[in-house]
Amino acid sequence: QVQLVESGGGLVQAGGSLRLSCAASGRTFSSYAMGWFRQAPGKERASVARISASGGSTYYADSVKGRFTISRDNAKNTVYLQMNSLKPEDTAVYYCAGRRSDSGTYAYWGQGTQVTVSS
């Protein structure tokens, strides 16, 4: 069982940066692949970035490639999302999620953190 708590959201102007953090409980964090998802008002939740359990493999949605960076520190049970060159269309609630490496389903979710980018 893994519990996830996000932090780092807020209000930022277009072109600015934010770093989201997701702290995980439990001693098996290093066996979980992690991802960041976002949901804007009136839209479906979408995958933003994902990282393998070891951190050796990452995936980014086309809309954030070159601007966002996902990373993890298994010693600190934390996954990060560095967001640069933010755009108003990045405004959403951002969720951290985890899945066991042998599962295709993200079974564990945080409560979400709001990111608002003003133009």
Image (cartoon, helix red, strand yellow):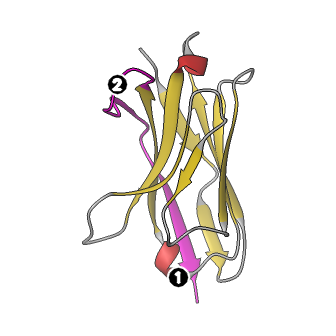
Q: Position of residue 114 (x, y in %)?
A: 49, 59
Query: Residue visible at 61% across and 40% down?
Result: 57
Task: Name the element at disc 2.
Answer: loop
Q: Which of 47 and 38 is in front in this view?
A: 47
What range of the chain is rendered magenta?
100-119
Task: Name the element at disc 1.
Answer: helix
Q: Position of residue 30 (x, y in %)?
A: 60, 19
Using the rendered view, name the quadrant where residue 9 is placed: bottom right
* Residue 119 sits above or below residue 77 on the image: below
Query: Residue visible at 66% across and 69% down?
Result: 67
**Is residue 104 one of those drawn in magenta?**
yes
**Is residue 83 one of those drawn in magenta?**
no
Residue linked to disc 1? 88
Q: What residue type is labelled 1?
A: Pro
Query: Residue visible at 69% across and 76% down?
Result: 85
- Compute the Cα span from label 2 to label 1: 34 Å
> Which is in the foreground here, disc 2 or disc 1?
2
* Quadrant of the image containing the C terminus: bottom right
Q: Which amino acid does label 2 sit on?
A: Ser
